[in-house]
Amino acid sequence: MRFYLCIFLLSITLVQAQTYEAGVILGGTNALADVGSQKHLSPSNFGFGLLFKWNKSQRYAWRAGLSYTNLSFNDKEAQDPARILRNLNGNTGLLELSTGLEVNFLPYNLHRFGPVFTPYIYSGLTVFRYDYNYFDSGNLMDTQKKDISFALPIHFGLKARVGSNSILGAEIGVRYTFTDNLDGSNANQYIFGDVYNNDWYVFSGLTLTYTFGQNPCFCAE
């Protein structure tokens, strides 16, 4: 009877056990817009941020992140000869807050001993603030104003436990934004480029998180 009671209590603890992760993300960023390079993955700017995860099960976790980068746009780095000849350049500071669901392809049990690793995918909703600028006669006009927009993030990554309480990961995160003015090409009457295609930006880098929270107990014989 004591044995079955122990198994029952252990099962309840395993169901209720919650593991959290908190840490940082560091890497490079690049944009896909009407000004600058057209390469999908070409990190040319530094980005950093904070991460928090709530692992609800071995298969998925709720995730939130706050990050900042300074996106640059330079036609000299473009692959289109017309852009290179146009020779526009600029930048925008971008602060984003993202939340959503991270899904693991393999069981991700941080309570067991031995190696723990899995590929994963993340998506949700991102809100970001950026500089509202525009081009006039080939020059970027800094209005000192900020605008807010939304984006749909899609991240692909791989994470593994290093040590007893640390998780190291690598990921590429693509954001489809709901604005066409990240690069200053679609502000009021100062409009050029493809007005039917919104801007994208990419954050690729490394994550390092520390795990903490409730652990399941192990009943003694």
Image: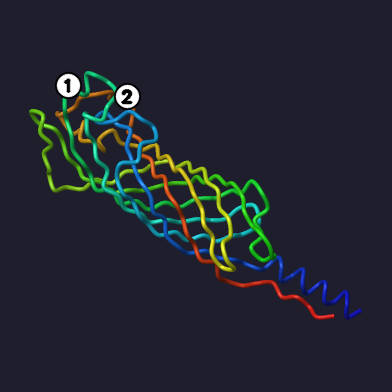
Query: In x, y percent, where is residue 77?
Result: 25, 30
Dot placed on the residue nearer the N-terminal end, 1 or 2 = 1
- Farthest residue toward the right? 1
Residue 23: image quadrant is: bottom left
Count of numbered marks: 2
Query: In x, y percent, where is residue 176?
Result: 39, 37
Count residues near mark 1 (Cα–Cα under 10 Å), then give few for <14, some for 14-19, many for 20+.
few
Choose between 162 and 1: the one closer to the eye.
162
Amino acid at dot 1: Leu
Horizontally, residue 7 falls left or right of residue 103, namely: right
Find numbered disc 1 in the image and state the secondary structure of the residue it sits on.
helix
Say if mark 1 contacts mark 2, CB within 8 Å: no
Find numbered disc 2 in the image and state the secondary structure of the residue it sits on.
loop
Q: CA distance from mark 1 to mark 2?
A: 23 Å
**1 vs 2, front mark:** 1
The N terminus: image quadrant: bottom right
Amino acid at dot 2: Tyr
At horizontal 77% and vertical 68% (from top left) the residue drawn is 11
Residue 196: assigned label: 2
At horizontal 55% and vertical 65% (from top left) the residue drawn is 20
The residue pinned by badge 1 equals 85
- Farthest residue toward the top? 82
User: Is 101 above or below relative to 109?
Assistant: above
The C terminus: image quadrant: bottom right
At horizontal 41% and vertical 55% (from top left) the residue drawn is 25
At horizontal 11% and vertical 39% (from top left) the residue drawn is 141
Count residues near mark 2 (Cα–Cα under 10 Å), then give few for <14, some for 14-19, many for 20+.
few
Query: In x, y percent, where is residue 107?
Result: 68, 53
Horizontally, residue 154 falls left or right of residue 77, namely: right
